[in-house]
Amino acid sequence: MGNFKLTTVEEFEAATERLLETGKKVGADGWQYRVANQTPHCKFGEQGVCCRICSMGPCRITPKAPRGICGCDVHGIVARNYLKFTAGGSATHSDHGREICHTLYNAKPEGPYKVKDPEKLIRIAKEWGVETEGKDIYDLAHEMAVRGLEEYGKVFGHQNFLKRAPQHTQEIWEREEIAPRAIDREVSCSLHMTHMGCSSKPEALIRQSLRSGLSDGWGGSMAGTEFSDVLFGTPKPIETEANLGVMEKENVNIVVHGHDPSLSEMICEYADDPEMIAYAKSKGAKGITVSGVCCTSNEVAMRRGIPMAGNFLQQENVVLTGACEAIVVDVQCIFPALGPLSKCFHTKFITTSPIAQMPDSEFIRFNAKTADENAKAIVKMAIDNFENRNPDLVYIPDLKQKATVGYSVEAIVKTLDGVTNSQVDETGTTKPLIECITSGVIRGAVAMVGCNNPKIRPDHAHIELMKKLIANDIIIVASGCSAQAAAKAGLMDKAAKDLCGAGLKRVCELADIPPVLHMGSCVDISRMMVLVAELAKDSGLNISQLPVVGCAPEWMSEKAVSIGNYVVATGLDTFLGVDPYVSGSTEVAELLTGGIREWVEAAYTVEKDIDKLGDAMIARIEEKREAIGI
Ligand code: XCC
Ligand code: SF4
């Protein structure tokens, strides 16, 4: 254990510098240069005070022009922009969930899509009041897929999954009129409210932002997570590796990127196929390596131990290694830059979804019915491309760390049960974790989530905050690009326990876990919602009383704002390192950082100084402990 060492951000940066040198040789662009071209950013946009929702505008608010042409003031404009931003994120996550429901509908005993976790399917069916007795598992899968799809357009009532929340939380949602109805309705309703001449009252717009967020976290994202588990298996702890060094020089490298596991699961299947491996060998490679970027990577890492090449701001780096035969993408967070960049190398940039089509890519339309043919064609294309590599351009940074990933709620409950050796019942409980928290061995938990953003030194905030928190005996659950930052640095290596305070270190040793638990992709933040719901029910506390907070220090996407809204609306204080374009309105900023606490018992804190952000989280956790007398 003695020689365990984190990979530092300086080491990531040196590797990137070296890769950018290769890029210069071939005339490649990079986000680092584009950021410079875009700086300084538009001040009106940054403050959220520009409105272009009707063609009388665009109107931008200044001291000299305090109202738009229609008379809307700055608070209305900022709040409307915030709601639109949320709706974009909610639609995106939820549509991903919908695709998974369609994949489930296409599941067949003979594949390519099968039901890998029938127990989980039955559990959800029972939860939704669907008869399971004597039903063929595939009939049940199809029925549940339709039920899942109906959640998107249900005529009456609220999201089925809301019942998973503690009674108190459900009452808050009812009382505040933010219990989400049909998922699509909340997105449509948001766009209706932000149309010219509808809402301009910040309270109304922010309330809808919370409801639209909740339709994502407790609706679309939860469907995405749960039905992905049914199809591809519920994650269990598994060993893998992270950082660019997982790409192998001698092998055909296929990188999967995006979010929807339907495609990447199939690619992994075929890359493992002896026939394909033999074919790769016949072309001079030693084998095939699949690695991932962004949340698609998290999905296949959690279920198959597929290594993680990197996170959001590392996506260009995988091509710059000169050793990437194909980067295969599905939806979301894909830089259009990959098109022109891949043209500077031999790399095939393969788009697969009608939702994410890009110039300079090869489009292989992926479809649940033809998934195996599609995946096979893609793997073959990558193998055929191996011989086109230019060896002079190949440089794979020698950076990688071990990581143990796969901490679904089910896995956490099971693993932590070992700590107190209490009996595991069929579903298990979170009581052992509660015991660790109430006794003070663990002070609390932080959900570290979200993206990279060039406005913040990439990965630095994620890693520094995690180091600080675990040193203070605060356990981390992580997802998305935050989880990948942790894995790349080595914080998901069990040996990282040495960086923890004495209490957390002991828990890590007893339960044999790393101090940062990988809970999956960004839709899997729904797992975190289920976890806090269970913690609240098992402890008899309200969610807002738990010493648990959320943090997205480097966030950038609309999805992240949707997430923030549902995390806050679920009762967890949320800490951001980047401002969500609301600084132009004191009213909106005050609502989000204070006023909404009266509605949902939680609010946002925005703090760009990472050290202060960490201190603020620790202080909040200690305050919460004190308030419940532990
Ligand atoms: Fe995208 Fe999910 Fe953000 Fe990463 S963390 S940059 S949204 S991949 Ni979701
Ligand atoms: Fe301007 Fe009002 Fe139109 Fe917005 S809605 S562009 S503020 S006139």
Image (cartoon, rainbow, N blue to C red):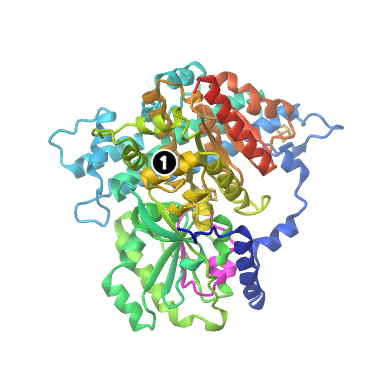
User: Can residue 493 be seen?
Assistant: no
Q: In the image, is 187 to the left or to the right of 237? A: right
Of residues 280 and 377, the one nearer the viewer is: 280
Of residues 119 and 50, the one nearer the viewer is: 119
Q: In the image, is 567 to the left or to the right of 23? A: left
Q: Is residue 105 above or below residue 619?
A: below
User: Looking at this rendering, what residue extends furthest in the top direction?
Assistant: 175
Magenta stretch bounds: 318-341
Q: In the image, is 432 to the left or to the right of 50? A: left
Q: Is residue 392 above or below residue 438?
A: below
Amino acid at dot 1: Val
Q: Quadrant of the N terminus?
A: bottom left
Q: Is residue 81 above or below residue 500?
A: above
- On whether residue 89 falls in the magenta region, the answer is no
Residue located at (27% from left, 40% from top): 120
User: Looking at this rendering, what residue extends furthest in the left direction?
Assistant: 134
- On whether residue 320 falls in the magenta region, the answer is yes
Q: Which residue is mark 1?
A: 507
